[in-house]
Amino acid sequence: MEALSHLLAGFAAALSVHYLLYAFAGCMLGTLIGLLPGLGPAAGTAILIPLTFSLDATGSIIMLCAIYYGAMYGGTITSVLMNVPGEGASAITCIDGYQMAKRGRAGAALAIAAIGSFVGGTIATVVLVFAAPPLAAVALKFGPPEFFGLMLLGLVLLITFSSENVVLGLLSALIGMALSIPGTDFVEGTPRMTFGILELMDGVGFVPVIMGLYGIGEVLAGLERKDPPITTMDINAKTLTAEEAKASVMPIARGTVIGTFLGLIPGIGTILPTLVSYATEKKLSKHPERFGQGAIEGVAGPETTNNAYANGALIPLFTLGVPASPTIAVLLGAFMMNGLAPGPFLFRDKPDFVWGVIASLYVGNLILLILNLPLVGLWVRLLRIPHSILFSLVLAFTVVGAFVTSNSIFDIGVLLAFGLIGYVFNKIGIPTAPMAFTLILGPLTENSLRQSLSMSGGDPAIFMRSATSISLLVLAVAALVWTAFSGLRRRRAAGGA
Amino acid sequence: MRRGRLVATGAMLAFCLFALWQSLLLPLTDRLGPGPGFFPFWLSLVGSAFAVALLVSIYREAPDPADADVRILPHGPGGRRWLAVVVSMAAVTAAMDFVGFRVAMLVFNAALVIALGERRWWIVAVFAVLGSYGVHYVFTTWLDVLLPSGRFGL
């Protein structure tokens, strides 16, 4: 009941005119960024962070969350109309969505994607409302040793789930952790590995790094490829039929459960939940041969999962301060830039902010549904803009965005350097997501480690003094061992084949 | 891409050894407990050991014949576009402090959109002006963000 009264207060804030405008602007901008092939929610959110600098903390996070799930839907539009996924999670939608478009059912595909996204996102937010406060209450009892265990577990899960090759994922994670070292020591206030560079006193900025890895890196990769055909399928007047709507009900229900549940687990990423949803729908269908030929269940399920995951993944962020995906890691960074530390203390110390943002998630999902059903025609026209203009816009915006982060030209250099690193890493198969995670979580991990050892006078046994701390460390080790074991088994199977 | 991974891991090892040396110049402990050098020291030690193990593992892998077809640096028309973008971004980074935001972005936007294939002069002009003077107006007037004006105040 207390959660409901907080939520009502949150709605009072979220429904104010300026916050509604921010949510609206975020949905529009997010959808626009999601339309651009190769630029996913992580790059889009990072690229648009500078737009929120002049807003207050609540407005800033409301807009960024709206950009996040707007970008998820934007990727769907190009998947259905052009057979080109705007971002990874929409790749599954290409399979049946584009086939539906070829049969003249593009409008129906986009409509069910919008409706499924709304249902999945809204229900995941309801789960957030009821699950978050008790989870935050448990986490309030955590001390530095427990937080260290939690950070370690989060990092292990993020690395193992986000990388096909865990060893290369670890390599990427270590690089990110190393990048988090330069700066000012938070205890002694002395410079640490800044080499006399003034701009490094605040550390390596995560916004230019993320924009470089995900934005510039993807654009550079896209420049090599031939431009995808600009022709798109026409949206005709035929909307969803009653039969299609009925066939989508259970896929939407299942997609909501899959996305919300998997959003709780750090590191899963956006592609796996949609794959699980598609595979589930195909398995449960009485006519699985229809999948791949334009089955509406193949669009309804994954698209619902997509948005349910996007909202469900906010639960570990709000309650524990652990990001579940690169995009959530960007949001975590945005929280920190606004002087907020996501986690249990946020619920206790800034309830107005937290419940205002949670209420705005409902509102944003509704805005997305209302916007995207009638505006699909506009997005289609935007897709006809030549890629020379679109990519130039993105590049110019990232340069401006990197500069205004700290009013420093040094950050433009960081943007370019990490754009090249992201490009090269993608070519040689080193995942970039672990680097992004550890760049943001590295300082938090070090903080909890040093605080713990300071409390115990340097005795590492402090990590074994509480059941919670021991459990988290054991889980982290178990996850690593299981991943190593699975990897070895896969290699033996591949060698034997 | 075996060779690429060897190079990346070698670079990582070099960086870790450098960080290890730098961390030894900082105090590992202080009166409160672990010092500023504590975390970098252990991280770079673990990182170095890991990088050595990975180098050995990658070196012992049988070369993949498919790697011969993979080229890290782009080539052909795509390669020229790629190089033009990288050079433009490097140039704007180097020049912005001297010529100011508006001039730097004007030239950058024009060069970028031409490098990416646009040939209609009016689109190039509109994009360049909007992306420089337009963006400058938005950030300085609406968003209260200072942007560099360079030596000439243009």
Image (cartoon, coloured by chain):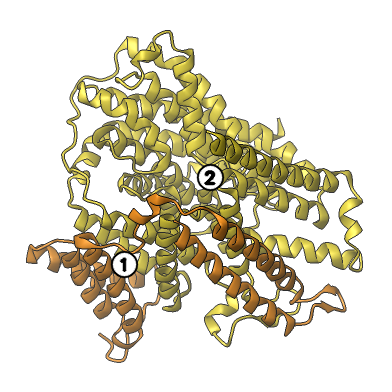
Q: Amino acid at mark 2?
A: Glu
Q: Are marks 2 and 1 in contact (CB under 8 Å)?
A: no
Mark 2 and mark 1, same subunit? no
Q: Which chain is orange?
A: B
Q: Position of residue A275 (x, y in %)?
A: 47, 30
Mark 2–mark 1 distance (CA, rounded to whole Å): 43 Å
Q: Residues within 10 Å of mark 2 (few under 14, many from 20)?
A: some
Q: Position of residue A149 (x, y in %)?
A: 77, 51
Task: Give me the residue at 84% from left, 62% from top.
Answer: A452
Residue B74 as seen in the image, left or right of residue A87: left
Task: Give me the residue at 46% from left, 48% from top.
Answer: A19
Determine if residue A335 is in view: no
- The answer to which quarter of the image holds residue B32 is bottom right
Task: Give me the residue at 26% from left, 35% from top.
Answer: A376
* Chain letter of the residue beneath label 1 in the structure image: B
Q: Looking at the picture, tell me which residue is in the foreground, A79 or A58.
A: A79
Residue A265 as seen in the image, left or right of residue B89: right
Q: Position of residue A251 (x, y in %)?
A: 46, 19
Q: Looking at the picture, tell me which residue is in the foreground, A307 or A421.
A: A421
Mark 2 lies on residue: A164
Determine if residue A269 is in view: yes
Mark 1: secondary structure: helix
Q: Amino acid at mark 1?
A: Val
Task: Give me the residue at 21% from left, 62% from top.
Answer: B76
Residue A321 as seen in the image, left or right of residue B63: right
* Chain letter of the residue beneath label 2 in the structure image: A
Mark 1 lies on residue: B138
Q: Residues within 10 Å of mark 1 (few under 14, many from 20)?
A: few
- The answer to which quarter of the image holds residue B115 is bottom left
Q: Which chain is yellow?
A: A
Locate the N terminus of chain A by quadrant: top right
Q: Position of residue A425 (x, y in %)?
A: 45, 59
